[in-house]
Image: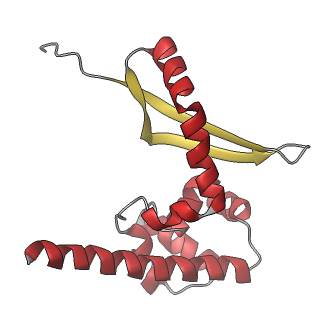
Amino acid sequence: MRIYSRLFQISSANYARQIMSNQFIKAKESKGLTYQQMAQLLSVNKVWLTSVLHGQNCCDIQLAHRICDTLGISHEYANELTSIPLRGNQNIINDPLIYRFNELFKVYGSSLRGIIHEEFGDGIMSAIDCKIDVTKNEQSRVILRIDGKFLPYYKGQLD
């Protein structure tokens, strides 16, 4: 029964966070702001800020207050932006754009893995210590840049 209770708490918290995320995004749209404009006003990375507004990342209280001020939202909602989220919404995979990223990594994942292992060694690229940027070129092509820290696997050596 305790596990069910905990799952219900997590599920309820995520639902509340999603409702608040929708409110932040609606406020951004009603102000006529783009994610890029907000990021510039707040001096933060636009992809990271977007993930905060979508409930997949959190920020400190000072930035949360600045976001609320920018969007004309009461500071009483700032704590929603500072709580640690349960990341990785499983329902969103049905979105066509996100599914294309899934396809991209299914097709090129083993190639990227091979190149990273060849150039860096046995390890992974961090998704935590990672910066992402999205830009558009003259031909309306999406340019996605991922700058992630390489983390080598532990090899059993003693300190």
**Residue displayed at 22% across by 73% down:** 7
Which residue in the rendered view is the most extreme toward the right?
A: 138
Residue 133 drawn above or below residue 17? above
Q: Quadrant of residue 42?
A: bottom right
Q: Is residue 65 left or right of residue 45?
A: left
Which residue in the rendered view is the most extreme toward the left?
A: 1
Q: Locate residue 94, reporting x and y percent.
A: 56, 64
- Answer whether residue 4 is visible to the viewer in this image: yes
**Residue displayed at 42% across by 58% down:** 88
Q: Is residue 42 left or right of residue 119?
A: right
Residue 136 drawn above or below residue 36? above
- Answer whether residue 44 is visible to the viewer in this image: no
Closer-to-camera residue (54/89): 89
Closer-to-camera residue (14/84): 14
Q: Locate residue 32, reporting x and y percent.
A: 77, 77
Q: Locate residue 55, reporting x and y percent.
A: 47, 68
Q: Quadrant of residue 70?
A: bottom right
Residue 51 drawn above or below residue 152? below
Quadrant location, the C terminus: top left
Q: Is residue 35 left or right of residue 6?
A: right
**Residue displayed at 44% across by 71% down:** 81
Quadrant location, the N terminus: bottom left
**Chosen colour scheme:** secondary structure
Q: Locate residue 20, reporting x and y percent.
A: 48, 81
Closer-to-camera residue (90/56): 90
Count of numbered circles on the image? 0
